[in-house]
Image: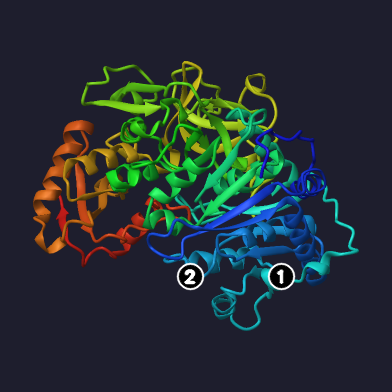
Amino acid sequence: MDSRRPPLVPACPTLPEYVRHWAETTPDRRAFTFVEHPAQHSRGVHRTLTWRRLDVRVRALAARLADETHPGDRVALLCPQGTEYVTAFLAALAAGLVAVPLYTPGLPGHADRLAGVLADARPSVVVTTSRTRDEVRDFLGTGGPRIVVADEVPDDEGRGREPVAPDAGATAYLQYTSGSTRAPAGVEISHGNVVANARQALSAYGLHTRPMTSVGWLPLYHDMGLVLSVAAPVARGALSVLMDPAAFLHEPVRWLRLLAAHPDAVSAAPNFAYDYCVATVTADQKEGLRLDKVTALINGSEPVRPGTADRFHAAFADQGLAPGTHCPSYGLAEATVFVCAARPGEPLSRFALDRDALAAGKALPARPDDPRAVLLAGCGTPAGQRVRIADPVSRALLSEGEVGEIWVQGPNVGGGYWNRDSQEVFGAEFADAAAGPGRWLRTGDLGTVLEGQLVVTGRLKDLIIVDGRNHYPQDVEATAQEAHDAVRRDRLAAFATPGGAGGECAVVVAEHARTALLAEQDVAAVARAVRGAVSARHGLRLADVVLVPPGTVPRTSSGKVSRALTRARYLEGAYGGRARAGAAG
């Protein structure tokens, strides 16, 4: 049985050294548990590695990888979610290699991205499991990288082998971006970067001095899943409980049950997941569910909506969920992941801002009940790093209340993009060096600082500029999905396309709700409702509204809607055969 007393945490320079420390000092404590759900209503089959057992497996696989590679080679992880994925990641780091966290070829809709990333990273070895070996081999074809099957490497392969001690400044892994606004690029994350970010996250959520259990379903190839479910627990010596993302999507209450089963639970999910739980968890499933021991629920990876937090806590208040558990957060792969976070136990910070002023670059307050107000959540304060707001053109430092590009500086910022010129993104400097000396990361995200908190307003590359006015696409999408019940929530994209006289016009492509059959819809009526709502609230005339079947709007590997790919497909005419309202005018 595990003691709930948190162990003393050393200052190790790399994650493999943390694993060895915990294996020596707390060998029988549970390190990682994977909960498998083999049947629809299964309560889960638990498979656990202690710190001693994890160390044995990491050493064995690291020895095999070292025999198959040269120092600095890339090792692609094409494993399903589970303890083998964790072992493979840590083993690549322990062998002094560069891990490339990916996914199996069976992930629906992402085969092209997987092939593109493999071509870019050029791994010499691919690690998978016996369960997925055949599909990986078929995907790679002849002449591809060598395959190592993690669960078939014997324990004694690591005996008598001295572990490598990687330099903290050496690249530990390539974290490929989700590709929501461009082609995926591999961010070079050093051993020092990931350890620093793990410590920053632990400190931000108050977990460095108290017991914690990480409970997660986010995929481990995703930056937030990798840091919160692997790096932070390893740095803390804490238990990490994992489940498959598909298991959550099939039955969301499984995630809540795991949160209830583990005291001091901490978890993270994108905004849609909290709304998904509200919509799908039944009254019968809530019976006996207790969430009063949950420490923090991190909301990140996509825009955080205050209304979502309100709905989630209202839905599970009777289960003992404390309002202060919801922690809006901001981060990105280029900064390993975590940048800013709201602290557990604090009330949600919400801001009602004037829409027109926001579009003009000023965050001015508005009445929350004003239909033209924009409601945004505060994402807290930086975690062990510096955050500034800069004018993206003049590179001038902006003051509180002015909207500009978010710039970040800290030990967690990656070294650049693999095999690409990264100076423009990772080497930014303020026009006045006194405003912020040194090099800064340009995030490409827009935001402002209000009452000391970071407020994220959108993506610089996603801005819709029509008739000289700025419109945030997520703002337009929120209006469109509320305009008609047939529009599926969080499965739509608003973007700009070339218009007449060299200008731009706005388009919305939206999936219809799964409960609504397209043949039974009055598509023109849906389009009119969307057009009317967007026009009234934003003063924006939509040039086109397209209604498409569920699953048609492309998403990134992390589950976010890819506006860039949706726009590209629209311009290619891919939606021409779908139900649509046609171009306006």
Question: How many numbered badges does the structure rendering display?
Answer: 2
Mark 1 or 2 closer to N-term? 2
Give the residue at x 26% y 17%. 367
Residue 98 in the image: state x and y as whole percent.
Answer: 72, 58
Residue 513: x percent and y percent?
22, 54
The answer to whether residue 435 is above or below residue 302 is: above
Q: Quadrant of residue 69?
A: bottom right
Residue 543: percent from left, percent from top: 20, 48
Dot 2: element: loop
Nearer to me, 249 or 541: 249
Examine the rendering and report whether any part of residue 187 can be seen. Answer: no
Asked if the residue at tag 2 contacts the one at tag 1, i.e. Cβ–Cβ closer than 8 Å, the answer is: no
Residue closer to the observer: 261 or 366: 261
Which quarter of the rendering shows the N terminus? Answer: top right
Please provide percent x and percent y for residue 401: 44, 18
Q: Amino acid at mark 2?
A: Gly
Colour scheme: rainbow
Q: Is the residue marked by circle 1 packed among few (<14), some (14-19), or many (20+) residues within 10 Å?
A: some
Where disc 1 sits, the SS reads: loop
Q: Residue sitting at 52 percent across and 47 percent down?
A: 216
- Residue 106 badge: 2
Left or right of residue 75, residue 259 in this image: left
Residue 372 vs 260, above or below: the answer is above
Q: Image check: 276 left or right of 160? A: left
Left or right, 233 with respect to 222, comes to right
**Dot 1 corresponds to which residue?**
124
The residue positioned farthest toward the bottom in the image shown? 142
Asked whether residue 267 is in view, the answer is yes
Seen in the image, is 76 located left or right of residue 521?
right
Q: Is residue 563 above or below residue 45?
A: above
Q: Residue at x 68, y 74 (%)?
A: 145
